Image: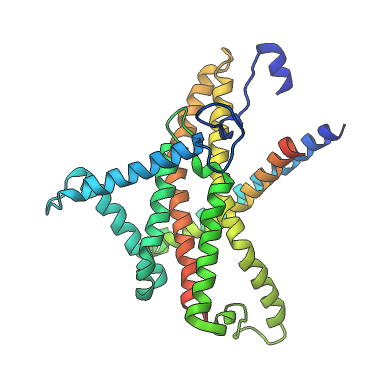
């Protein structure tokens, strides 16, 4: 990297796109400062509200395009919640749908060039991931009482292995929110950093055709990854919720 | 000197991405092998496929994160 910088004047930092900047002025970032992160989260929320409010306004029997997009997403998530958690998980559907829509829309809006990707910030995804963790744990204890701890005690394992398995299960339970949030942030951040690296190579005339082809290919992959990561986050939420509702496997 | 060692460490951590690639390939390949034998059962297992892919991929992302930390935070 240093060598190229010397020859071709290649000056780029693939991770500069993730810096949180205030929108107005350059003061320090406080919790109330309006930053580019806030802006793009607000745009994502407005887009969600736009699609669903405008889409469901007609309530047509034969849906318009926008209405079918809304209906497809609703039906997709509803079926997923029902399949994974069972009938009694359906009452938590609004929370899961909210998570899915926020992640999906911020992922896809982040693919617009020069935009900021809120889901690439670990702060954002950690709030989502730990929110799910706290909700699910609280729900497990409220619904099942102390029986929720049976999640860690495998009653069908050999008796001598049970304490060891219990320790492993407890550790893996507490790693869940970390991996849940870092998976999303890491995927989005890695994808965007790769895009930027290829964009940097496009400045060198020798390799620019390859680099531009690479950008197109990686961009296509990113479109796929954005959808899949939103799906994965949501389905893992459903799996954790199922554990809380039915801890005895 | 320490900064250079950190860069070497970052490069070593990137090996983890290759390991994650092996994991993801195993998951997807086994799914495909099973799905081609019994296509009617394949649709019901896509959720499991994606969960498996996510778990395999997350570890590669952890390796990526370690190399990022070594590059920029150490």
In the image as oriented, which residue stretches furthest toward the left? A61
Please, which colouring scheme is shown? rainbow
Q: Nearer the viewer, residue A138 or A228?
A: A138
Q: Nearer the viewer, residue A44 or A90?
A: A44
Q: Quadrant of residue A107?
A: top left
Q: Nearer the viewer, residue A26 or B27?
A: A26
Q: Is residue B11 above or below residue A235?
A: above
From the viewer's perspective, tell me whether residue A19 is left or right of residue A67: right
- Residue located at (54% from left, 42% from top): A120
In the image as oriented, which residue stretches furthest toward the right? B1
Q: Position of residue A178 (x, y in %)?
A: 61, 57
Which quadrant holds the N terminus of chain A?
top right
From the viewer's perspective, tell me whether residue B22 is left or right of residue A229: right
- Residue located at (33% from left, 63% from top): A79
Q: Nearer the viewer, residue A24 or A186?
A: A24
In the image as oriented, which residue stretches furthest toward the bottom? A159
Q: Is residue A130 above or below residue A101?
A: below
From the viewer's perspective, tell me whether residue B74 is left or right of residue A243: right
- Residue located at (62% from left, 47% from top): B61
Q: Position of residue A210 (x, y in %)?
A: 53, 22
Q: Position of residue A23 (x, y in %)?
A: 50, 30
Q: Position of residue A47 (x, y in %)?
A: 33, 41
Circle count: 0
């Amino acid at each position: 990297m240093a060598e190229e910088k010397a020859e071709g004047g290649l000056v780029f930092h693939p991770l500069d796109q993730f810096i949180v900047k205030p929108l107005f002025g350059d003061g320090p970032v406080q919790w109330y400062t309006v930053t580019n992160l806030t802006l793009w989260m607000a745009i994502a929320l407005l887009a969600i509200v736009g699609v669903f409010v405008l889409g469901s306004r007609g309530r047509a029997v034969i849906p318009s395009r926008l209405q079918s997009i809304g209906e497809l997403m609703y039906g997709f998530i509803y079926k997923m919640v029902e399949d994974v958690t069972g009938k009694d998980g359906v009452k938590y559907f609004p929370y899961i749908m909210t998570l899915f829509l926020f992640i999906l829309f911020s992922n896809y809006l982040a693919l617009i060039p020069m935009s900021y990707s809120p889901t690439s910030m670990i702060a954002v995804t950690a709030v989502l991931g730990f929110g799910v963790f706290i909700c699910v744990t609280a729900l497990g204890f409220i619904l099942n009482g102390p029986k929720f701890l049976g999640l860690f005690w495998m009653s069908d394992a050999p008796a001598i292995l049970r304490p060891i398995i219990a320790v492993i299960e407890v550790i893996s339970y507490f790693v869940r929110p970390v991996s849940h949030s870092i998976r999303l942030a890491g995927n989005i951040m890695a994808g965007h950093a790769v895009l930027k690296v290829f964009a940097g190579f496009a400045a060198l005339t020798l390799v620019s055709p390859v680099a531009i082809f690479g950008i197109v290919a990686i961009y296509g992959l990113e479109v796929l990854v954005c959808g899949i990561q939103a799906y994965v986050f949501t389905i893992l939420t459903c799996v954790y919720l199922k554990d809380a509702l039915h801890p005895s496997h | 000197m320490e900064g250079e060692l950190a860069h070497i460490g970052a490069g070593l951590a990137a090996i983890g991405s290759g390991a994650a690639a092996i994991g993801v390939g195993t998951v997807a390949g086994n799914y495909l092998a099973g799905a081609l034998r019994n296509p009617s059962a394949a649709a019901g297992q896509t959720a499991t496929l994606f969960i498996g892919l996510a778990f395999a991929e997350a570890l590669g992302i952890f390796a990526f994160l370690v190399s990022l930390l070594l590059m920029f935070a150490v």
